[in-house]
Image (spheres, grey):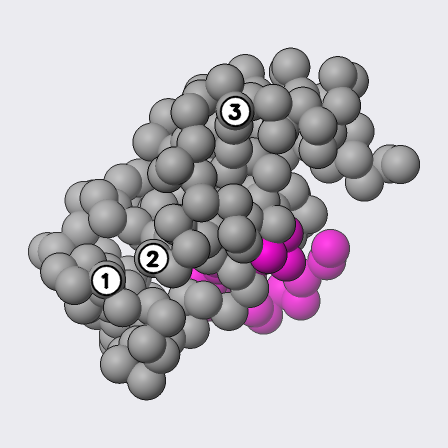
Amino acid sequence: VSFRAETADIPLLVGSTFGEFNAPKSYGIHKNEMGEAEQEKLVWKTFGEKIAGRGVELFRKAYPERQVVDLVSMDYMFRNYVNRYMERRTALNHSTWNYIFNLDMPMMGGVSPLHGNDLGFIFHTTGKAPALQEPGITEKVEDQVFRSVIAFARTGNPNHEGLPQWDPSSPDAQYTMLFGKCPEVRMNFDVELNNWMAENLLAD
């Protein structure tokens, strides 16, 4: 990736969803009805011994709030590219922010957010999508995401009083806002996980 010199100081807000195009693998699993042993069995069946052991270990470290079966539907391609992009872009400036949309859809016992699921929250149009509706949750997250986008459009900074402090990233410290039921900023939290998954799965 290379950047034109005159764009170096333009603020950027870069994000992806937890599941992207892997999210459909969570359809019909009904993870909230599964015990942990059953979830782990599905992970091992999906990835095999080479991936599952270390993958589960790194996933639990990166996403302690998620159930282990979510590793099956986690995106490891888009996010891996985002991590690499952020490292190069932030070497130029102090005005690049990163997020992951981490809110499950409520149907089928919880479905990982797929590619584009963040758009209804960004444009404040979730009311047009019945599948996204979780009373008391959807509107709260929508407000947090929408206000961040509006703040960024106005000032080049996505922070507002409804979120924890969200710093721009640097090559050594990537601060990622996880938009979900409890928004949280984590630093460099999933780089090792995504590198591991990408190296072992995308190489096949």
Q: Do tag 1 and tag 2 residues touch (Cβ < 8 Å)?
A: yes
Of residues 193 and 168, the one nearer the viewer is: 193
Of residues 200 and 169, the one nearer the viewer is: 200
Please state if 100 lies on the left or on the right of 125 as rendered: right
Task: For marks 3 and 2, give the CA distance.
Answer: 21 Å
Residue at image position (43%, 62%) is 13
Badge 3 marks a residue whose secondary structure is helix
Badge 1 marks a residue whose secondary structure is loop
Residue at mark 2: 106
Task: For marks 1 and 2, give the CA distance.
Answer: 6 Å
- Using the rendered view, name the quadrant where residue 200 is placed: top right
Region of the chain picked out in magenta, as a range: 1-24
Badge 2 marks a residue whose secondary structure is loop
**Measured from the top left, where is residue 123 in percent x and y?**
33, 80
Residue at mark 1: 134
Residue at mark 3: 38
Task: For marks 3 and 1, give the CA distance.
Answer: 26 Å
**Measured from the top left, where is residue 189 in percent x and y?**
45, 29
